[in-house]
Amino acid sequence: MSPQTKYLLKGGTIATFVQGKASPLVKKADVLVEGDTITRIEQDIPAGPGVEVIDCEDKWITPGFVDTHRHIFMTVLRANHCDYLLSEYFIKMSWTVQGSLTPTEVGIGTLAGCLDALHNGVTTILDHFHAAHTPAHADAALSAVLESGARVIWAPARQSAPTQLFPSMQFANDAETARWQREKLREWGAKDKGKLRPDGRVRLGLAYDSMWQGTPDMHKEFLTYARSVPVAVITAHIVQGPGILQWRDAGLLGPDVVFSHCNVLAERTRPDDEMWAALKESGAAIAATPADELGMAHGNPVSQDALRRGVKCGLGVDATSINSGDLFTQMRFALQWARGHDHERIRLNKETPPFHNKDNSADVFRLATLGGAEALGLADLIGSVEVGKRADLLVFDANSVNLGGAADPIAGVVFHAASEDVEFVFVDGEIVKRNGKLVREWGPVAKELKKRADEVRERWPADKLEETWKKWYDTNGAPIF
């Protein structure tokens, strides 16, 4: 994209949150994009020379969606894990299949996963990349991210694959893996203070799920090193258990930390609960993925609780091996779970029925846009439609079969929209989806993805995975996280 590229989005209805305002802003206005930036938002902006005008009459203009937790490479395993429990997933994927994936498989999964996200209007992703088993795997994933055009905080994980499951788990390669991962982290970060593209569209992060082994001093040393590299975000899984307090007590929390899930908090309802307090006081954030949290037995989602407590929170897809790659689904799950749970509590406690729902469409729209940007430390750049922000924008066809007749773009996007309603997707002012189709040709990507996905399934037939899971379950019971 030329830095002089200019677009005028003419006559649309803008729907966005802005920081400091509790309610969304909905107004009819033109949006001028120059280079990578939104430069004007006014009615009746004249089209100057060299400006491409995009007719946005009967269109909605929103921020691009922000995904705060996704394992992008797992698109090479699409739909393989939809019926798994979390415990089952670890035996049938994380500790078996994942370690066998080739760099080529990781690469095509990552490219396809980024394009899937863009097609669904997800312009920014925190990629928890836990398949960096060799430098070649890491290079393949990073190359695909850079090629895709998505905005990504690419967070390779400090971990290695198991070398043995039975009779006990062993990680014989972990010392060597830790050595090269540490060296590569410095190499990636040294290029431009963690910018992996000159324009900063791809930035370096770190995934760190290693607190279950070693000492607090060891973890503090490594994360201090990572922050000096620097990494933009440090992310880790917290499902159940005391992990939040372990991070707090080791002095590791900070505004650059994003914990996925945090379902342990669902039952911690005291106003002065120390886990909630640790997150709020440190500025750490939660990435909620309600669809698979409910289905895989993580526990109950906590996104709406986080909003009420003033804890930063965004939404995520988690993995397209489990869920679809859009945030429409996650918004609906988050909202309807919270409503249903509240209605159940009212009924069981024989309380007076409410006058209105406590949670609304606007709450989850914010989670998927500005809330996600705040969680990733990017709210100064993205997450809203404002002058001076990067032009990460979506244009919805409000006359589509799904949206026609809807007057409220917030409710329309949350409850009725789908990928086919997203006509244009901009990332950094670059059009990556135009007139309902990805700019990048999808056919060759799909062909390669199918080939590699079939090869993985041939190596790991369902009966072989089931046999391994049964052996583990009969010997050890279900892993608890």
Image (cartoon, rainbow, N blue to C red):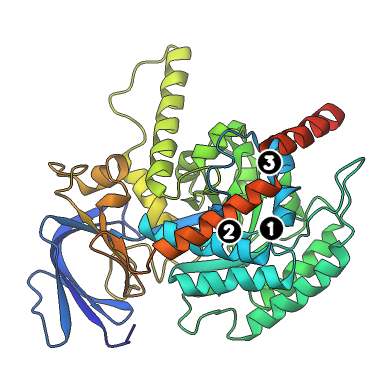
Left or right of 360, for residue 423 = left
Return the x and y of residue 359 as percentages of the image width and height. Answer: 36, 36
Tell me: residue 85, above or below residue 278: above
Tell us which disc is closer to us: 3 or 1.
Answer: 3
Residue corresponding to mark 3: 461
User: Who comes first in sequence, dot 3 or dot 1?
Assistant: 1
Q: Secondary structure at mark 2?
A: helix
The image quadrant of residue 45 is: bottom left
Who's the residue at 43% across and 62% down the image?
Answer: 115
Distance of label 2 from label 1 (alpha carbons): 10 Å
Which amino acid type is marked by label 1? Answer: Leu
Residue 432: image location, x then y, percent: 34, 69
Quadrant holding the N terminus: bottom left
Q: Work out which quarter of the rendered image holds the C terminus and state it.
A: top right
What residue is shown with label 2? Answer: 73
Q: Amino acid at mark 2?
A: Phe
At 14% from the left and 49% from the top, the residue drawn is 399
Percent x, y of residue 188: 65, 79
